[in-house]
Amino acid sequence: MNTQLHIFTNGKYDENKLDDIYLINQDNVPAVGSLESIDKLRELVSISSYHSVLLLDKNVIGFSICFREGTSYWSENYKYFTQGLKSFLYIDRIAIDHNYRRKGLGSSLYKDIFSNAKLENLRVTAEVNTKPVNEISLNFHNHMGFEQIGERKFKHHDVAYLIK
């Protein structure tokens, strides 16, 4: 597969790609959190510290959105890491179009995130659903070198907190 990984940071992204990113996000629920609108996605991207878009022949087939410490992000999962870490890069969401899953593209996005975090000597954090269990994601994160450092039970789901 001939893919091009394009990285856009600090709000420098193609506004025309938001519809595609939103559809991929919603197609990946509950593995990633649902977004109420494209405007909410636009807000996430605008406050993110790092985000990437995976393109194949100019078509969006995946994306990531990440946050550094000190961001005005409202997520309870993000807030978990702010309580115990002085500096980090939190992976809020990574999603791949269902037609392109299980082809190593998620690994490519993660490796790019790791490279970016290494530039500033940052630990990379994430969470994965444990109820309902997302076994594929748990195994993937384990393979990528993440370790569990906590967990939390919410009303409708539970998560494991991970760090690398």
Image (cartoon, rainbow, N blue to C red):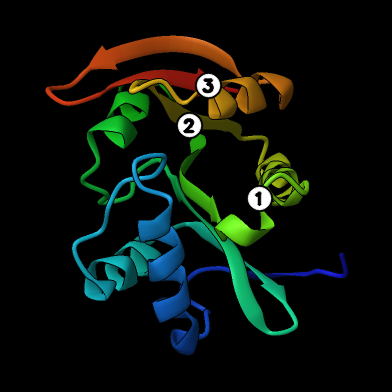
The amino acid sitting under disc 2 is Ala
- In the rendered structure, the answer to whether residue 141 lies left or right of residue 90 reads right
Residue under pointer 1: 101
Give the farthest residue toward the bottom.
16
Q: How far apart are the alpha carbons under marks 2 and 1?
A: 19 Å
Residue under pointer 3: 135
Quadrant including the C terminus: top right
The amino acid sitting under disc 3 is Glu
Look at the image and tell me whether residue 122 can be seen. yes
Which residue sits at x=32%, y=73%?
42
Residue under pointer 2: 126
- Helix, strand or loop at disc 1? loop
Q: Compared with residue 131, is residue 14 higher up or lower down, i.e. above or below?
A: below
**Picture mark count:** 3
Q: Earlier in the sequence, mark 2 or mark 1?
A: 1
- Helix, strand or loop at disc 3? helix
- In the rendered structure, the answer to whether residue 146 lies left or right of residue 56 reads left
Give the quarter of the image for residue 81.
top left
Tell which of 129 and 119 is nearer to you: 129
The amino acid sitting under disc 1 is Arg
Which residue sits at x=67%, y=35%?
121
Query: Where residue 111 appears, x then y in whole percent?
Result: 75, 44
User: Crowding near pointer 1: few (<14 within 10 Å), some, many (20+)?
Assistant: few
Q: Earlier in the sequence, mark 3 or mark 2?
A: 2
Give the farthest residue toward the right.
2
